[in-house]
Amino acid sequence: MSPALLLPLLCFGILAGRNATTDGYVYLGHNEDQYGQKMLNIYQVPATPERCAYLWFEFPGQAAGDSYANEFGVCLASNKCRSREDRAQGSLVYEIRTTAIQKACSAREAVHIIGSLVSQYGYADSGRSYLVADQKEGWIVAVVQGHHWVAQRVPDDEIATIPNYYTIGEINLKDTLNYLGSKDIVSYARRRGWYKPGRDGAFNFRRAYADPKTLTSSYNLDRHTLAQETFFGDFQPETFSRKPLRKFHRRDLSQLLTEAPIRHDATALTTVFTLNPAFPPEKGTVVWVGFPGQDAANQSQWTVFMRVPESCHRYATADEALAKHFSETDNFRERWPRHFYWHYLYPETDIDVLPHDFTVFVPSQPGNRFNDHFHVLEDPARGLLYAFWTQGSFEAANDERVVFSKSTDGGRSWTDPVMLAGSPSLDNPQPVAAWQQPMISRSGRLYLLWNQETTVKKHLQGVMCGRYSDDAGATWSQPETVPFPIRFQADPEDPSLPPVWCMWQRPLRFGQDGRYLAGCSRYDRKGIARVEFWQYENIDEDPKIRDIRISFFNTGEQAFDSSAVESDEAYFPREGKITEEACIIGLPDGRLFAVMRTSIGHPVWSVSADNGQTWSRPEVLREKDGGPAILQPCSPCPIYDLKGPEARSGQYVLFVHDAFDFNAPTAYQNRGPLYRRDGVFVPGAHQPVWFGEGVLFSPRETGNSFYTSFTALDGESVLWFGDHKYYLFGKIMN
């Protein structure tokens, strides 16, 4: 089907009432679909006496493509819905949405504003459905070319889904709590012959006003069927909203909106507005944003008053953008070549944004576009480098797998990746594998362990499995399970269910007598993460996988908990206070130093004087003793020894974002520019490593989530990193 034929079929929306969601939030989910030349800009629009403040997702030149969230928690998006109107005229399209978002203090008020404008000035296009929500309720407002409109409230315990046709059916305008609309919505349909009571029975807006072709379009029906079967178990196209099979979480909406055919080649933006009634609107409104090609798990979080990176918009101010929305709307890439959106539309064109010295892998197929948790380790005895990473179509996809590659020439070239565990493709989904941990025994046996999904379809919940190779990765043993000999109170109550855990730093020889040691993030039944440490006791004895023994340190009640950390600012993120993803370095005095990410606005640190068996109470990471605290959203903050992972040289490098908004409701904030901070060991200091000023490392304004590794081979120290969880690179560090 040609793009011209698809043009009427744009966008998809979901509204979920607060009693239909697991957390009691109102959700508004939306895919904005556009064909042809497009460009997304994001602005934080400041308040003036004439308007409130709002977050604006702008598509220049488009009269009906923008989405918004304002300071009162009012969120708005829309779907094109063709009507059968062929006589009436109107003068407004774009002004309807801008006026509503600038003036409305509630979703109901936004509905009244939209209706008033349509009644007074008329709608100038064939038809449209606006999705409007706040912390209390959600509405769908259907407008028709000319001066007719109708709106219906989504019941608190129901979910409404809408493709590109009207979904409002029977109405009762006397019930003003749940319906609003034009007084002559029925009589006008009767005059036009669209509705005859003797023939049609009760008035049904959808049947009377919709272009009949839209109601039978396979493109609409295919998308609507998937959504309704997901939420309700079957497809009933005539229903406006229904009670779901169970309560759904934001992640379910994010995932559904990224599945075909709901998402397709023309999807330009995915947004899930989450409205938390427990916070003031300016803090309780969080927008989960997915750009073209992004998976559900990699969506970023935006709030109304957050600082928007300069690369996210055409013009310096929102007022200039408002004035020029319909001007300079061609040759976008030529006019603004450094704009952030091009990475997502044309990911193959920005391979050199972050300078690098080695290229390990560049995606070439849809099934290998997600590449993360990148571990490179050296095999000095053989003169080889081994690379392991998690790969898939997108993060948390049903084809996540662990792959392996190696280099015989110091990292200049690499073999094609080979799958060692997990799911080969979306067409042939198998239990997924991720969070791999490679190690080499003293005899040269190469081990690979990973988190293996079982029948439980929950991210990070799995058993530990592994394989080994005695010939540098040419052949591998059959996968086996590593026993989990200890369970803790945080683990699932049902002993048949595996724990929820992940490890991202590869194990290093920091344990007792040079055994492998690594930090593990362990999640309790509420999803709160704490850090424990695992020591692999017998890797150097070349055991079979089923005979690997693990000791667990800093576990149970001793596991790190950021709620006990003394911080400079009191901050209570809505996801709870978590500590996770420890990265360990060795100090010249024999101690270990670990840095961990948290949800309190700063990394934390701890030291161990007994090879990782016991650890000091975590503290906020500072530039130096008594110095300013280092800022960091809930994002990886790797630290490495510049002379080699286990060198204990006293010279270190830390990677952080140096930014955090303590007014935002969530710690999962924009993973924008990444900065390098060099650190030195300071004998006698309370915090044993002090850090210099940040130096820009990655200029990308979003998406810098660095699950990295470090090697030192032939005197050359290299940071191995995944750029945008897409390319895999290496950079020589001085």
Image: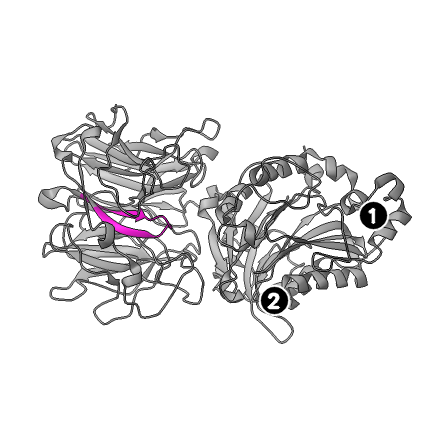
Q: Are marks 2 and 1 in contact (CB under 8 Å)?
A: no
Picture layout, residue 209 above or below residue 55: above
Which residue does the numbered mark 2 point to in the structure image? 320
Q: In the displayed structure, does residue 231 sit left or right of residue 651?
A: right
Residue 501 relative to residue 226: left or right: left
Q: Is residue 233 above or below residue 657?
A: above
Nearest the eye: 481 or 58? 481
Mark 1 lies on residue: 85
Residue depicted at x 80% and y 46%: 209
Res 418 seen here? no
Query: Can you name the residue that lies furthest to the right here?
Result: 191
Q: Which residues are magenta?
A: 517-533
Could you say where residue 388 lies in the image, as x and y percent from the top left? 30, 36
The numbered dot on residue 171 is none
Is residue 524 left or right of 126 when viewed as pictured? Answer: left
Q: What's the residue at 70%, 45% (across, down)?
A: 167
> At which x and y percent is residue 264?
58, 39
10 Å neighbourhood of mark 1: few (<14), some, or many (≥20)? many
Classify mark 1: helix, strand or loop. loop
What's the residue type where badge 2 is placed?
Glu
> Taking the image as drawn, is residue 532 in sight?
yes
Q: Looking at this view, is 283 or 497 the one in front?
A: 497
Q: Is residue 525 magenta?
A: yes
Residue 699: x percent and y percent?
Answer: 40, 56
